[in-house]
Amino acid sequence: MQPAQPGQRVPISPKADCRITLRGSEGQRIAIAAISQAGGGRVLAFEQIDPQHWFMDGMAELEGDFEIVAYVMDDRHGGFTNHAYPIAVEVDGTTWQMPEPTEQLAAVILAEVYTRNGERRMKLSNEGFTFGIDAYVRARNLGPVEVPFRNTPGVPLPGNGPVPHPDGRGSGRPAPVPGQLLGSGSGVLIAPDIIVTNAHVIEDGQRFEIGRARDVAVPLAVDVQHDLALLRCTTHGSPLPLRIGSPLFLGEDVMAAGFPLIDVLGADLKVTTGNVSGLTGGGGDVSRFQFSAPIGSGSSGGAIIDECGNLVGITSASLAHQNMRERGSISENVNFGIRAALVFEMAAAAGADLPPLPIATDNLRRNVVARARNAVVSILVHA
């Protein structure tokens, strides 16, 4: 067995067999397929010998270039291919041990098979997608392909239906009537037709309507752990630039823009002001920060912007005031945001290209709010 170096290229025979062994603890959750972009996408499943071993005889059915991909069969409840490592790839009698990815990935390209100057070659890859095989399919523009062991006809792909809460919340509630309004939240346009919001905003939803025009959005990626979700929607507006090159500083002025309590306060944008009151979230969580601009139910997923209107975070939660009062404490406007850097990383992992927007420097409040009004949207969630 030889250690594989990502990017390493090796010659293989034209009709080489391929055997893949998953030696990790959760190999039973992983499937293997060869995927070609030719003709809009063609997918050929490896044969599963047992939960740890997958085999393809000859690799001859897929003409042209293709990729060998390992992916979590059902990632609605989390999980990564990392837990299946070490992974061994055997071709032409040589076994290559793939190093575990440094990132948490739910779909990994183990190898690329291609032809150059009449010679069949294989490039060992080990690159992938945090948000699974769906993100891979979108990034490769494969269209409505059927992914083996996952995309069963008539069964929605994960992300196109309810988003499960990690602690099982909601499982004991009566099933809502189809079409019933479950709630509302906020979202932020970060690229043409791409909206970021909280994962908990779209939880349990089947249909999502954006803004006053009620444009229909579909989930692109969901990260329950970091409480983020990306939606794709053809809608009007201009994306906000993400400020990820300069850190937040304690005491910095910020504004929160969103749509709290639509049924009480109306469906127009609300903007409140405050400051960065803490550089970490609960328990020292460095992916979040604390801010003091007032928010309300429905603000979740809205924008937290700096004094020039650059996106520095996504509104996520407030401290549970009632719980604090029961402990004899008082807390007001103790709110938490998710850092913009996580939004950028999620979009990149999902294959959603963000436009290279220049950082805004105009801090005239009227102009800043106008830009926020053009980028922050309401989200209605229906069963």
Image: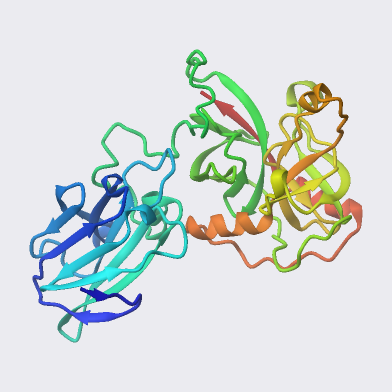
Whether residue 39 is situated above or below residue 322 in the rendered picture:
below
The residue closer to the viewer here, 225 or 116, is: 225
Q: In the image, residue 262 lies at what x, y percent?
A: 74, 26
The residue closer to the viewer here, 361 or 348, is: 348
> Residue at (26%, 37%) from the top-left corner?
152
Left or right of residue 90, residue 365 in this image: right
> Residue at (59%, 21%) from the top-left corner?
181
> Residue at (69%, 60%) from the top-left corner?
242
Q: In the image, residue 146 lies at what x, y percent?
A: 26, 46
Whether residue 218 is situated above or below residue 143 in the rendered picture:
above
The residue closer to the viewer here, 162 or 166, is: 166
Q: In the image, residue 289 lies at what x, y percent?
A: 75, 50
On the question of residue 37 being in view, the answer is no
Q: Quadrant of residue 113?
A: bottom left
On the question of residue 237 being in view, the answer is yes
The residue closer to the viewer here, 199 or 375, is: 199
Q: Quadrant of residue 64?
A: bottom left
Left or right of residue 310, residue 127 in this image: left
Q: Quadrant of residue 299?
A: top right
